[in-house]
Image (cartoon, rainbow, N blue to C red):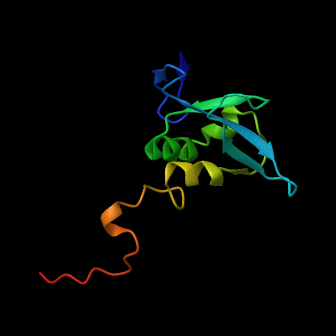
Amino acid sequence: MRTCVGCRKQASTSELLRVVAVESEDGVSVIEPDPARIRPGRGAHLHPDPACLALAERRRALGRALRVTGVVDPGPLRELLGTPDGGAPVPPDQQGRTTDMSTR
């Protein structure tokens, strides 16, 4: 049993996605998914759900759980979970739309 850093609910490891912090050359810690659970270093667990990622970012839980100081970039994790800018995922019926042309 592990605890999701986003929603703080306990779940089995098979239900959670392990993430690790990888230091980039510019000093930013990039949060990368580790689905095989083989990467070295301290890991944190998260439900593979955009809502849990948003909660973890809002609470700044990823940096705390991974014991990372400084700037944390969850970009690769956002791409995997389908959240373009850290917000809620874009519904399939609204992807690519810039305006709503419907009439009332």
Front residue of this view, candidates 5 and 24: 24
Say how many tags the image has.
0
| Residue 27 image position (x, y, % from top left) | 85, 53
Question: Where residue 71 appears, x then y in whole percent?
Answer: 75, 51
Q: Is residue 14 above or below residue 53?
A: above
Question: Quadrant location of the C terminus?
Answer: bottom left
x and y, in percent, of residue 52 in the image:
48, 40
Residue with the most extreme front position = 36
Image position, residue 70 (x, y; %): 78, 48
Answer with left or right where residue 46 lies relative to residue 63: left
Q: Quadrant of residue 19?
A: top right
Q: Residue furthest left?
A: 104
**Which residue shows up at 49% across the image and 38% down it?**
48
User: Is 51 on the left-hand or right-hand side of 85?
Assistant: left
**Of residues 69 and 18, the one drawn nearer to the viewer in this rendering:** 18
Q: Residue at x 56, y 49 (%)?
A: 80
Outermost residue toward the top in this view = 1
Residue 91 placement, left or right of 18: left
Question: Taking 40 as reference, is 62 above or below it?
Answer: below
Residue 104 vertical placement versus 69 (above, below): below
Name which residue lies at 67% across and 28% down: 37
Q: What residue sits 33% from the left and 81% below the top?
A: 99
52 vs 95, nearest the viewer: 95
